[in-house]
Image: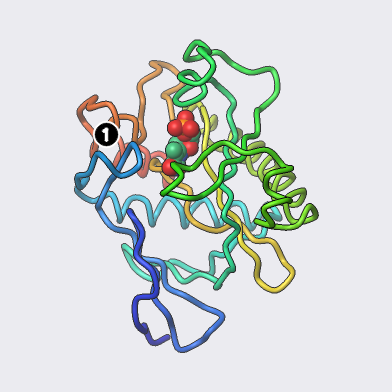
Amino acid sequence: MIKGKMLYEGKAKQVFATDDPTLLIQRFKDDATAFDGTKKSTIAGKGVVNNRIASHMFDLLEKRGVPTHFVEQLDDREMLIRALEMVKVEVIMRNVAAGSICRRYGTEEGLVFDEPILELYFKSDPHHDPLMNTEHIIQFQLCTAETLAEMSGMARKINTIMREFFHSIGINLVDFKLEFGLAGDRVLLGDEISPDTCRFWDLKTGEKLDKDRFRFDLGKVDEAYQEMLARVTSA
Ligand code: TMP
């Protein structure tokens, strides 16, 4: 596999072409941003941790019948992925109230929902990723109703699988963000699953082991990422 030119650089990752147009290389950086990129820093070793955790999670999901863009982990910071036409929608699943749902609705942090809540956001930095409903998505032609239904079904299945997995390593899976894309007419899970994109609370102590440590200056940021890597890879 020959690594080609960089096609895209986001806040936490870069994407490179390969000599096969259906395959790309996704490289994880140590850069961390929060609050729409207004808070910026680096977290030592984050790219390595996120690549390893995401590779582990994609592998687990594939084994459980969820199609993803993951092909294989290439090295510490890179994975080989299938090229997708990304849907500009972020799907967030919430099992427990935290973050923006508390700010938006005054919901008490830690409230456990009887059923997981699925939220849809417009992936658009200039518009600050606003919350949307299914009608906005269809009318703005971000994807078809069929694709959106498929994404929602996959997100709920992924939540069931991930909740059980993280519970088995002593973690309460509070919420997480997913992004999907199309490879031809197939809907695949894309992007990443990592402490950047999930909230992980220790089941016994409630300690936060995710990017909230960076967002809210809670300290021991890289230690939390390393702890998550150790638990995920011990499973
Ligand atoms: P929120 O409570 O800030 O809406 O975040 C919900 C979940 O989504 C949380 O696990 C963090 C993740 N997330 C991202 O991965 N990217 C983002 O840009 C945002 C805002 C949240």
Picture residue at 65% right of the left edge, 56% below the top: 142
- Left or right, 212 with respect to 166, comes to left
Residue 205 percent coordinates (x, y): 38, 16
Q: In this view of the protein, which residue sits in the foreground, 127 or 102?
A: 127
Picture residue at 36% right of the left edge, 84% below the top: 4
Residue 73 percent coordinates (x, y): 43, 66
Q: Is residue 200 visible?
A: yes
- Judging by the rendered image, the residue that carries numbered circle 1 is 214
Residue 84 percent coordinates (x, y): 58, 69
Task: Kindly indicate the quadrant of the structure image that contains residue 156.
Answer: top right
Quadrant of the snapshot with the N terminus: bottom left
Picture residue at 25% right of the left edge, 51% below the top: 31
Q: Is residue 199 visible?
A: no
| Rendered position, 117 above or below 24 | above
Q: How many marks?
A: 1
Residue 58 percent coordinates (x, y): 54, 55
Q: In this view of the protein, which residue sits in the foreground, 201 or 20?
A: 20
